[in-house]
Amino acid sequence: MVETCYPWGLSVAVHHQPLGFSYGENVIGPVPEVRRLDQIRPSLRDPDCDGPEEVYAIAMDVAQTQDREVLEQHRLLFGIVTYATGRLGEEPIRSQGHVHCISRHSGWSPPELYEIWQGRAIIYMQEYVADDPGRCFAVMAGPGEKVLVPPGWGHATISACPEEPLTFGAWCDREYGFDYEEVRAHRGLAWYPRLQGQEIVWQHNDAWFPGELQVVTPRQYIEFGITPEPAYPQVVADPARYRFISHPGEVASLWRHFHP
């Protein structure tokens, strides 16, 4: 099955069997990396669960040929991810969870801007990846909606519908890196999503200090200049407006008391 993604500003086709992408004219990107079930078992509630062998495919640094230079100048990078259908035992299909490595050029663990293309997503995020996770949020998002994860927060992306593939784009610092150490040491993030029928319920991970989970819907990030239009055309038209992704320290005051 193939799903084209032209409405989001790029000529990209998403493949679900097998998972991956193909690029249209004037679009460049890497061969997708496929995350397999055995790779993410350490962060699952039940590491021995059954599920699809190929859990998700990811392609980082996708762009139109004519946009690559300006994105490099502003240290911005665009990635695309698509998930399999199904479930991971009692959990929905999801990423393993991580925090972004500190960027050498900015000295910050950079933020990430998600845009949902297909399916229903839950962007789970927690303030810290120490034993006390701080504030925890589950942001429920659908096609066209955007979710901003602030600097230094642990996060994971979850498919909210087992029968429908999830596909999304994400903007991050070109000097991106994923740190899984603390998440794996705690056997996942602070809250596990579980499927009860077609509904998602949440179970606290006892490896973290007790706390509360806030389930919310996306908001408009007016203070960052983000509009409801597709993200890719916005960024390439005015990349300086999105310096908060690659240079988060320039807007340090906006991250204090951030609410997704």
Image (cartoon, rainbow, N blue to C red):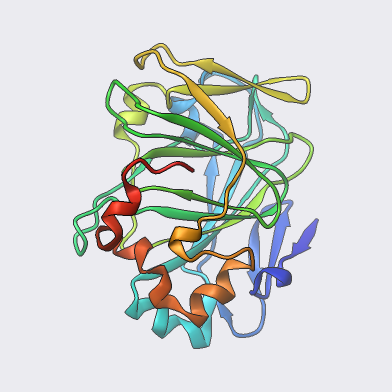
Which x, y percent locates residue 215? 58, 30
* Residue 171 can be seen in this image: no
Left or right of 258? Residue 64 is right
* Residue 190 can be seen in this image: yes
Residue 194 lies in quadrant:
top right
**Quadrant, the N terminus:** bottom right
Which x, y percent locates residue 217? 62, 40
Residue shown at 43%/23% (left/top)?
A: 190
Residue shown at 52%/70% (left/top)?
A: 62
Residue shown at 68%/47% (left/top)?
A: 166
Which x, y percent locates residue 200? 67, 24
Which x, y percent locates residue 258? 39, 43
Residue 42 lies in quadrant:
top left
In the picture as drawn, the residue positioned furthest to the bottom comes out as 66
Instruction: Give the total number of marks visible in the rendering.
Output: 0
In the depicted structure, whether residue 30 falls above or below residue 123: below
Q: Is 31 in front, or is 118? A: 118
Residue shown at 55%/74% (left/top)?
A: 234
Q: Is 237 in front, or is 21? A: 237
In the depicted structure, whether residue 199 falls above or below residue 139: above
Q: Is 134 in front, or is 232? A: 134
Q: Is 156 in front, or is 253? A: 253
